[in-house]
Image (cartoon, helix red, strand yellow):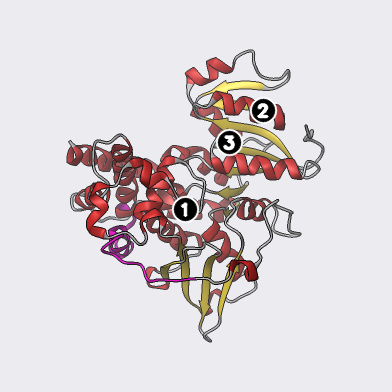
């Protein structure tokens, strides 16, 4: 086992037991002289947390689920302190000892702790789409006030970030996010009603959690990423688009006024954008395989079919409106995604449910976190009504 410690960057990892959290741990273990764990935050997976705590030896472990925290009592290495609940996670994310926060909680549950880190002026590696989708204006305004550095961890946004470095942002004519197209990119849209949760979760390129994998299958993840890019890079909706690229080698492209298109390429492995977020210069070894383009052979692209992926049509409408619509889109999708995985609705009902919710919400600007929660709660309630 590699012992972490020393005077390196002290990390607080929100969502430590998920796929992004575990990949973050892998990068940390490759660079024990540069990074140490201050706090690891998980939800219910106490066995995975036990493994991570043994490897990383954090000062704190937090399980937001009280029962999971109870199961960990007496099992952690001496010196590791244990807490339960989201309040503890939020406090540690903003604690003076924390140098950087990896925000990898899934869903809007990660919003309070991530915002606390931003308000405290931390470097924040943002892997939680919902933070910017639901509260993008609030997050980026808070970062400007506090001086926090918000660095994207999504592979697509990390790619855009790299392609924009050293270039005049006013010269950007288009930001193009790539999408794998998920498991159904070539499937007849007329057959999608019969898709099972197991089929939707079987992503061809990425090893992700169930919720995100279903979002990839509907391309709702790309819809959320377009909204996220709008806030991260302060770009108008008409400068944001997506294209299907099955190999997931090119992660994003930025087109400039002179016709130049810059692209970022790498093997599809989340450790690359994670390492970039943790330290951009000088670059860290991430442990991912080298990209051999001769071996890859060829790269393919196709336009997004909005009949197969109606979420992409929907997001264009949402981005033309106020941010109350993106809050509703995210909340309704979380409810519908879960209902599909629980076999209460069909696959094609996911986007249909979201669309019905959007028809019933106000199109108004939202500037307070308390109002974000009100709009979020209302959209969830309406989504459950639609489903039932």
Q: Which residues are magenta?
A: 300-324
At a point 51% along the width and 77% down the height, the residue shown is 255
Is residue 161 found left or right of 140 in the rendered image?
right
Where, by quadrant of the figure, is residue 72 drawn? top right
Q: In which quadrant of the rendered image does the C terminus lie?
A: top left
Q: Circles 2 and 1: CB distance less than 8 Å?
A: no
Q: What residue is disc 1 on?
A: 204
Is residue 352 found left or right of 277 in the rendered image?
left
Of 263 and 105, the residue lying toward us? 263
Of 76 and 64, the residue lying toward us? 76
Please say if 149 is above or below 387.
Answer: below
At a point 66% along the width and 19% down the height, the residue shown is 76
Mark 1 / mark 3, whichever is N-terminal: 3
Q: Residues within 10 Å of mark 3 (few under 14, many from 20)?
A: many
Label 2 residue SS: helix
Q: What residue is disc 2 on?
A: 53
Q: Position of residue 305 (x, y in %)?
A: 31, 66
Of 384 and 310, the residue lying toward us? 310
Is residue 203 found left or right of 155 in the rendered image?
left
């Amino acid at each position: 086992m590699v012992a972490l410690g020393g005077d390196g960057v002290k990390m607080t990892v929100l969502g430590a037991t998920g796929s992004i959290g575990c990949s973050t741990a892998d990068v940390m273990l490759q660079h024990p002289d540069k990074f140490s764990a201050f706090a690891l935050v998980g939800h219910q997976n106490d066995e995975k947390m036990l493994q991570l705590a043994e490897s990383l030896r954090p000062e704190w472990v937090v399980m937001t689920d009280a029962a999971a925290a109870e199961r960990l009592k007496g099992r952690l290495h001496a010196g590791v302190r244990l807490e339960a609940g989201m309040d503890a996670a939020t406090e540690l994310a903003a604690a003076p000892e924390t140098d950087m926060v990896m925000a990898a909680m899934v869903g809007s549950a990660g919003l309070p702790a991530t915002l606390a880190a931003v308000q405290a002026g931390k470097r924040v590696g943002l892997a939680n789409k919902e933070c910017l989708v639901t509260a993008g204006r609030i997050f980026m305004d808070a970062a400007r006030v506090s001086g926090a550095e918000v660095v994207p961890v999504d592979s697509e946004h990390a790619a855009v970030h790299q392609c924009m470095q050293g270039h005049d942002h006013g010269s950007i004519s288009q930001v193009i996010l790539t999408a794998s197209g998920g498991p159904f990119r070539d499937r007849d849209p007329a057959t999608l009603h019969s898709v099972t949760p197991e089929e939707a979760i079987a992503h061809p390129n990425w090893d992700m959690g169930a919720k995100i994998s279903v979002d990839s299958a509907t391309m709702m993840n790309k819809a959320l990423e377009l909204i996220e890019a709008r806030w991260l890079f302060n770009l108008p909706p008409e400068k944001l688009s997506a294209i299907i690229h099955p190999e997931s080698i090119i992660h994003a492209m930025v087109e400039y006024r002179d016709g130049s298109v810059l692209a970022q390429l790498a093997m599809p492995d989340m450790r690359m954008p994670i390492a970039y977020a943790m330290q951009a210069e000088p670059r860290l070894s991430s442990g991912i395989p080298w990209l051999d383009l001769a071996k890859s052979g060829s790269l393919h692209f196709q336009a997004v079919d909005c009949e197969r992926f109606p979420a992409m049509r929907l997001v264009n409408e949402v981005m033309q409106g106020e941010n109350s619509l993106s809050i509703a889109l995210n909340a309704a999708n979380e409810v519908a995604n879960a209902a599909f995985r629980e076999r209460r609705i069909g696959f094609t009902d996911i986007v249909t449910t979201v669309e019905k919710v959007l028809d019933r919400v106000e199109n108004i600007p939202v500037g307070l976190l308390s109002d974000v929660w009100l709009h979020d709660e209302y959209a969830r309630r309406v989504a459950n009504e639609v489903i039932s």
